[in-house]
Amino acid sequence: STKEEKYRVQAAQFCDRLGKYRMPFAWTAIYLLNIVNGGGSMERESRREGREASVEKRTREASVEKTSEHEMSRAASLDAGAGDRRTGPSGGQFESFRKRSKDDMSAGRRGSVDRGRSGYEKYRSWSPDSYSSSMDSFRPVTLTVSSFFKQEGAKLNDEDLYKFLADLKRPSSVLKRVKCIPATLKLDISPCPEEPRYTLTPELLRVEPYPDDKGRPTKEILEFPSKEVFAPFTVYRNLMYVYPKSLNFANRQGSARNLAVKVQFLAGEDETYALPVIFGKSSCPELSREVSAAVTYHNKSPDFYEEVKIKLPAKLTETHHLLFTFYHISCQVKKNEPSPTEVPVGYTWLPLYRDGRLVSGDFNLPVSVERLPTNYSLHHPEIQIPSMKWVDNHKGVFSVSVRAVSSIFAQDEQIDRFMNLYA
């Protein structure tokens, strides 16, 4: 019909203009400990008293974005991608959730729970023998999840999500206000074979045996332990993980509110120096020169939920830096008035190599409202550069976390100093 054709054309136009942008949509939580420890019949198709699904919960949390990926320590992302695991903050809601959790959680549409003993407490009480026995008896299972919680745009940070997890384990009026989205997701979960085939390392290098190009590859996940593990590197590893956290444009003049951040790894100050070292997501090129975080609609102070995984060069100089470009994304097209989809609204950067050391940690960076001047990368953005205009009087309005896992660049200051003295 004419009406259906009109909708089809509109959908095609939106996909052409906005298809590369993503927005957080829904999430759920899956308690994996019972899957390993809970017997053989794991096909989840519960229909109890109007509940559409019964899903065991723990701290593995799935953030369902439109083609997005974000991985946290003890958190499983539902869509395939290039990131590894992300460690959540120590302390705060997550720590209290781990310590206070006293229930096995089996949540339906309204987040109702079944009481039981905490999986975390079970985990702590396991001896190596009982853990080994559980893994030996673990058989492949299929898990069906039939309900998800709508992701609220203003509650994307880790603390908010951990608070939701804490609320899931007890009756709470908070969950009654969370919209549930009916959907079906099936997960096949099985133990890893002793000698897996078609395996890729976190750097996407093939692990022998890799018989041919026909098999479906399995990617190794790089673990971020909650406590430091002191062990020597036995392989070359040189990776960096970048986590854009939040942006505060509440005091920025203008109407920018559908905000996206583009991340690039540069060896100079021109776009031509953007290196193809950013690992791509599923169905994307293996390595790319840029990546954009998900967009939160009509929010001038968004929280970002992204992991950017970078293959570091073996040799760094003081010109290497991360460039963050902020855009307003125009969702609507004005009639008879062509307008760009992306409008730059801010810039900032982070030098990655200073005084012979790789830079990492948590940063609150000021954002410039104008294009960056020549030789900007030789300075830190916290330094006032003459003639530059800043958002909110040069305050640190953009939060980002950088973590490195490298056999080349020591993260401990004393070890790094020792290595440089005797190199």
Image (spheres, rainbow, N blue to C red):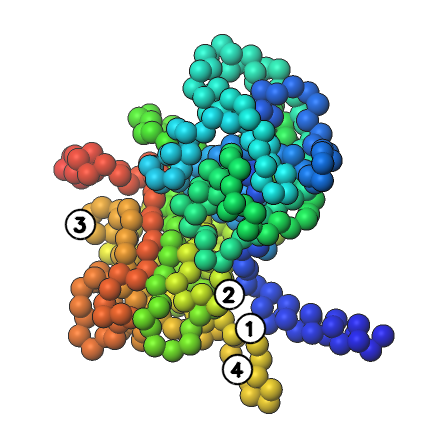
Disc nearest the viewer among 2 and 1 = 2
From the top left corner, tell me how far across and down residue 184 is, in percent.
70, 44
Which residue is disc 1 drawn over?
331
Indicate the amino acid at tag 1.
Answer: Cys
Judged left or right of residue 319, residue 141 is right
Residue 234 higher or lower than 400, as above or below: above
Q: CA distance from mark 4 to mark 2?
A: 18 Å
Kindly check if marks 2 and 1 are in contact, taking CB atoms under 8 A apart as contact.
yes
Which residue is disc 2 drawn over?
297
Residue located 49% across and 58% down the image: 153
- Name the quarter where the C terminus is drawn: top left
From the top left corner, tell me how far across and down residue 28 is, in percent.
57, 43
Which residue is disc 3 drawn over?
355
Task: Tell me where residue 405 sits by quadrant.
Answer: top left
Q: Residue extending furthest bottom?
A: 336
Q: Which mark is residue 339?
A: 4
Q: Secondary structure at mark 1?
A: loop
Q: Earlier in the sequence, mark 4 or mark 1?
A: 1
